Image (spheres, coloured by chain):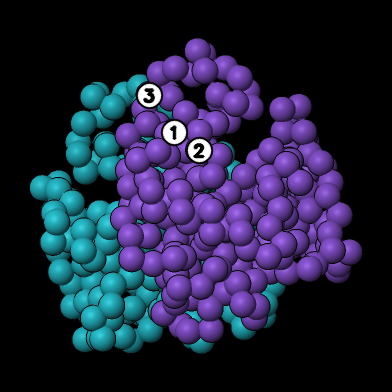
Chain colours: A cyan, B purple
Amino acid sequence: MLKLYQSQPSGNCYKIRLLLTQLDIPFEKIEIDIFKKESRTSEFLKKNLNGRVPVVETESGRFLPESNAILFYLSEGTPFFPDDRFERAQVMQWLFFEQYSHEPYIATSRYWISLLKKPEEYRQQLEQKREPGYAALRVMDEHLSDREFFVGDRYTIADIALFAYTHVADEGNFDLLGFSKILAWIERIKARPKYISIQE
Amino acid sequence: MLKLYQSQPSGNCYKIRLLLTQLDIPFEKIEIDIFKKESRTSEFLKKNLNGRVPVVETESGRFLPESNAILFYLSEGTPFFPDDRFERAQVMQWLFFEQYSHEPYIATSRYWISLLKKPEEYRQQLEQKREPGYAALRVMDEHLSDREFFVGDRYTIADIALFAYTHVADEGNFDLLGFSKILAWIERIKARPKYISIQE
């Protein structure tokens, strides 16, 4: 059975659980306590030299890190990844947008505020994260102004990747109230068959 | 003809020029002066809502941003992207590593020091970039300890993506002297057929 080395509250790990569940692929969760630096042990570094979760271990014992690379690996050849060449590239566009222009601001703020629970200690860094975080949300909201999903009018891994940290953006003190298109899109994702929450 | 909206000194744009040249695909360069914020004009935001270069315009007039998504788009079905499913995912692993764990430290330092030429103004931020930047280089060097290229013993877009900012890391005051495997890999890349430099 496929193994998922993960941290339950991590949005990057939630992406994988959500896709695996919606693909009906059984998997075993192995909890790595990142607060105890369990992803930096010499044993774990054999699975991922970069010392981060999630990592997937295939049935043949190979390891794959990087949440969005795992989404790609699991979704190729399924309805969650397009067949059309240009749409495939557009899915990638949003996956890279998520990791470069979204996650470092919105996920990191949530981590400091709601997981580490040290908003005062990180006050200055949190201030620096606000404008680029809201810029990412504005890009998403405008892109969604005339479409239901991020690529090709169909639910794909681009939606899963962006949903993971956007729907809990309030836990990093990002207010989604002004982003009506994002809010409607979040409800569409939550209504998908076999949807699971980040707690599951 | 394919159009590349780009900034010549940007490593992200260089990735695309290098691949297009090695694929023998003719293209037109359209220079966007990011120092004059030309990537943030309302005209340019129609090409990329996120206001960044590179952006590729296809012959049919469609726009694709995000350097690593463009590499994927151009390389699918060529020797620069593997056929094997797991190797394809491993290429993605390194592309996401590059954008999340490498570029924000090594490219940003080069930008502040050698392009903006304001090392004093950014002194504090530059200090914060050093440890994670060197951590990325250590991951690369260790990964290269028993292989010639990043994935599957063959030159792929994973090498192109990582090469772009690594081979000019010194311009961001990162010293590659202790990274013998990276230095040897850089020489292998420079020896590839149809290699072009970042100035070209």
Q: Using the image, name the chain to which the residue with label 1 belongs.
A: B
Mark 1 neighbour class, 10 Å CA radius: few under 14, some 14 to 19, many 20 or more: some
- Residue picked out by circle 2: B169
- Residue at 63%, 23% (x, y): give it: B116
Residue type for callout 1: Phe
Q: Tag 2, which secondary structure? A: helix
Report the residue that reaches farthest toward the top. Answer: B120
- Residue picked out by circle 1: B174
Residue A9: x %, y % from top left: 23, 55
Q: Quadrant of the N terminus of chain A?
A: bottom left
> Is any part of residue A44 visible from this angle?
yes
Residue B84: x %, y % from top left: 48, 84
Mark 1 vs 2: CB contact within 8 A: yes
CA distance for labels 1 and 3: 11 Å
CA distance for labels 1 and 2: 5 Å
- Residue at 24%, 24% (x, y): give it: A120
Residue A119 is drawn in which quadrant? top left
Mark 2 neighbour class, 10 Å CA radius: few under 14, some 14 to 19, many 20 or more: many
